[in-house]
Amino acid sequence: MRAASRASKTADIWFRVVAGLCASTPVLFLVVIGVVVLIDSIPVIRYMGWHFLTGVNWDLGDMYGNMVVRNGVSAPAGATYGALPYIVGTLASSVLAMLIAIPVSVCTAVILAYRVHGPVKSVFSILVELLAGIPSVVFGLWGMVVLGPWIVHDLGPAINRVLGFIPFLRGSAGTGLGLLNSALVLALMVVPILTATTRDLLEQVPVLYREGGIGLGMTDWEVIRRICLPYVKDGLIGAVALGWGRAMGETMAVLMVGGSGMNALPHTIFSPISTMASVIANQLDSALTDATHLAVHALAELALVLMVLTLITNWLARILVQRSSKTLREGVRA
Amino acid sequence: MKWNRKQWAGLTASAAVLVTLAGCGSGAGNSDTSNAANSTDNSTSSASSAPVTLNETGSSLLYPLFNSQWIPAYKSVHPNVTINAASTGSGKGISDAVAGNVQIGASDAYMSDALVQQNPSMLNIPLAISAQQIMYNIPGLSADKHLNLSGDVIAKIYMGEIKQWNDPAIAKLNPGVSLPNQPITTIHRSDSSGDTFLFSQYLSDTNSEWNTKYKYNTTISWPSLGNRSIGAKGNDGVVTQLANTKYSIGYVGISWLDKATAQGLGYAALQNKAGKDVLPTKDSIAAAANAMVNQVPDDERISLVYAPGDNSYPIVNFEYAVVNSHQSGDVAQALKDFLQWAIQPNGGNSSQYMDPVHFLPLPSSVEPKSEAQINKIGS
Amino acid sequence: MNQSRRLRRKLGSWIGFGGSWLATALVLFSLVDMVATILWHGVLSFRPAMLWTVTSGNGGGLENAILGTLYLVFLAVVISAPLGILGGIFVSEFAGSRLASVIRFCTEGLSGVPSIVIGYFGYLFMVIRWGWEFSTLAGSLALTVIMVPYILRSTEASLQQVPHALREAAWGLGMTKSQAITRVIWKSGASGIITGVLLAVAIGLGETAPLLYTAGWSMYNPSLALTHHQIGYLTYVVWTYIDMPYNESHALAYSAACVLLVVILFIHLVLRTLVQRRWSRTH
């Protein structure tokens, strides 16, 4: 054994400092993005106030006319930025997507965890995880050329026939682009996240618990229903929150299959929608032709709202996942 | 141990170099020969000046002319000038040019007064004359039969006041035509578009309700008709959406006319200021342009929409190159040369390039004004 | 009565598993349909010449987009891999638990920030404020912001799995902490770190939203200049050319999607085998 030389100690310190600087980059990125987006949205917060969140009209105003000044902010005449349709579009498409994705992924995870074994299991698992790697434009492309026509010709009429008595589910399928298409594509995008997490959680349920259930005379399904699923509940909720955050922030797929709905809340499941993310992508070039730059600031506030929403769900998810992994570990020990 | 330090030092140094390179920002000067080296073999007969790249974004109406006609043609004359075009919508063309992201912003709309005041060095240079047609997808309507439509009726369709193709208001304009009893789907541009600008100008000129509520702009806060109104990106997107959607209506730039009719779409004869129904033809577009030429100001920002005259087609416009007059040396000269070439009757404005996209060359009284604006470009 | 209850429970079980199988089939069918649709159209429309011609007119080739994508992702990896790996090492080995949790918290947050927000930020900051115009560097820095959290997290996770005894042994030999890491510990964590980097590459290859307003688009092969020169990428082709009413444009879009899909699926398969091998070795 030899003592560390002076040189290696300096090297150690240098290494620490450099590594520390590198480790601080995510913090830096997050803070800078947050601050820039916040500062950029101040003029619109002053101009619109709470109406930004409750207004239905998104109108850049008469850019070829005169500018007006309101609340100390100059804007094209008639400009109003009501983000409610986009907030609702984001929430509706992502919630609907989760409603579809949760049962599907939990069921798939049950099969993957308990019903298939050996090579079949690993092939299935690989396939599901591959789904997670597919770029979102490819999802969008598939939604446009496959799901769209299918909704128009088969799914739309079928929903109308079977569930048409519910107002929200009744109506013409239009072009097939809209809320339903977005929700289906988003659901498929979050299924791999949910399935993989749920499968891992289910595999960690102690065998003792399951055997106990069987010993009580439960059927296999009842063991899953009454013992395994309640056991992994926290982790599952965490995974759901994680997937939900992803669904809310998705841009390209929704831009391609959402139908770019504007200025109205969705009336039916087939209505064209825009989400906050797709509006930012779609409207930035329009906004940049506004001489007062207020439209760009409006998009910044949209980005702010979106960022806050996704950060909250994301962090909530992490906390829940962490809590559940702790209880799981304790469970294994017990 | 030394090896380790070196390794880490190397890693951090490379990161640092990248960051500093980035910090300098203005690294444009370094050679970009690889850019010019590709595709076309420009080895021979090259001029002495250094290779220059001109970037263009904007109007999807101008794009077919730029991309399929002008770029290959100019490349054969000036092999050391590389022109890169992207069809992004006029709004992005304007904003990219103003921000200095591109040298040429193509637009069907001129810049607003406010934007010009804010950026006094920006020029709006007409390159050609184009038009816009109203297109529809009505299965069963024979291809050589054109519906007659007025701006007032179209505005009512887009505002949801006219919902069916066999509405009395449409039937009144088209006696003897059997119109389908089908709901109309309206298609509009979802990107910031000069076509939207022209279309909404026509509607504003002809329907007072439209004029007070929506006015004209490159982006309109469209009335929502549920899933009976759809946004599409670019003229290309509108044509695709029209073709995919039965009983739909939309507005399409004239350079896309051949492609659109090949997809089975029809286009309307529009009611002009004199109350006549006119189809977009060479003559009717020229008539509209000629009715307006004597009003063209020196900065050439003027609308040609809804021009007077019996034979004038109502939706006609200048195709603008939005250009910053301050450019760096090489680029300024290359840009000037290209724009001068583009507006010459024996250059870019010759019929061999104009005819395939149904554009018209600049009228002889307008061309000098464009030329004077081009000459303002300098470093 | 007991009989009917038994029957009901059996039926419930049957329905439960039937539904589960159905769900699994649905997921697998969607996946297969998506991959098959893209590959089918892609292979039909793909011509080898696309690999060495650039985009022109309404179609052309993909050389510029492929090279551009590689260049963007390469630059992004060159920047983000050191940041992420060193950052991960710091969080795992040096940081106190409070500092580590702060960094972890922000990293999780950053990975949850929608990519369009990062693109928007990149546009306002790099393209406009710093005046880089649409450029390779702006695009790859936007990708970097997206890739760093993944690399950092997977580095940290794989280092956490290295047994503490190994560290103690290294320290016991008189090594400083950094020597222990650079000589001993990284070897056990290497496959995990590589997995993280590859995963980040796969993500970078498939991104569109952060590049729309930072990288621009170019029909020519990328120049080496970092700023002031636009650059093409594959996802742009998919997004734009599918909307054009030309068959050759659709062919190009499908080919681009197909190339992307094949490359990304390949990376994921490599990843899977890497992970599986490691797993089977440690267990």
Image (tube, coloured by chain):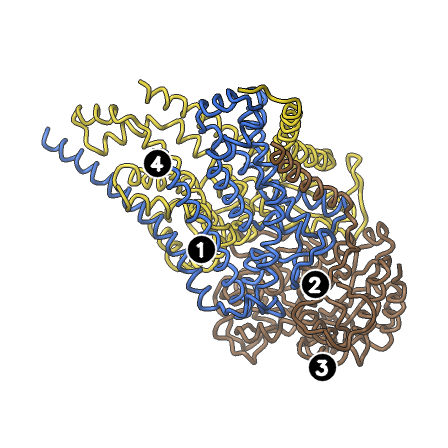
Chain colours: A yellow, B brown, C blue
The residue that disc 3 covers is B352
- Mark 3, chain letter? B
Amino acid, disc 1 = Ala
How far across and down, in percent of the image, does residue B325 sit?
86, 59
Near-viewer residue (B173 or C253): C253
Quarter of the image with the C terminus of chain B is bottom right
Amino acid type for the residue under numbered disc 2: Asn
Task: Say which of B177 and A290 sits in front.
Answer: A290
Secondary element at image label 4: helix
Which residue in the structure is indicated by mark 4? Answer: A199
The vertical placement of B39 against B90, above or below, is below
Label 2, on which residue?
A: B35
Q: Is residue C272 left or right of residue C151?
A: left
Residue at mark 4: chain: A
Q: Are marks 4 and 2 on the same chain?
A: no
Helix, strand, or loop for circle 1?
A: loop
Q: Residues within 10 Å of mark 1 (few under 14, many from 20)?
A: many
Does A206 appear above or below C111? above
Marks 1 and 4 sit apart, C-alpha to C-alpha, by 35 Å
Q: Chain of mark 2?
A: B
* Image point (56%, 45%), residue name: A275
Q: Are marks 4 and 2 in contact (CB under 8 Å)?
A: no
- The amino acid type, in three-letter code, at marker 3 is Gln
Secondary structure state at the residue bearing disc 2:
helix
Residue B308: x and y, percent? 78, 72
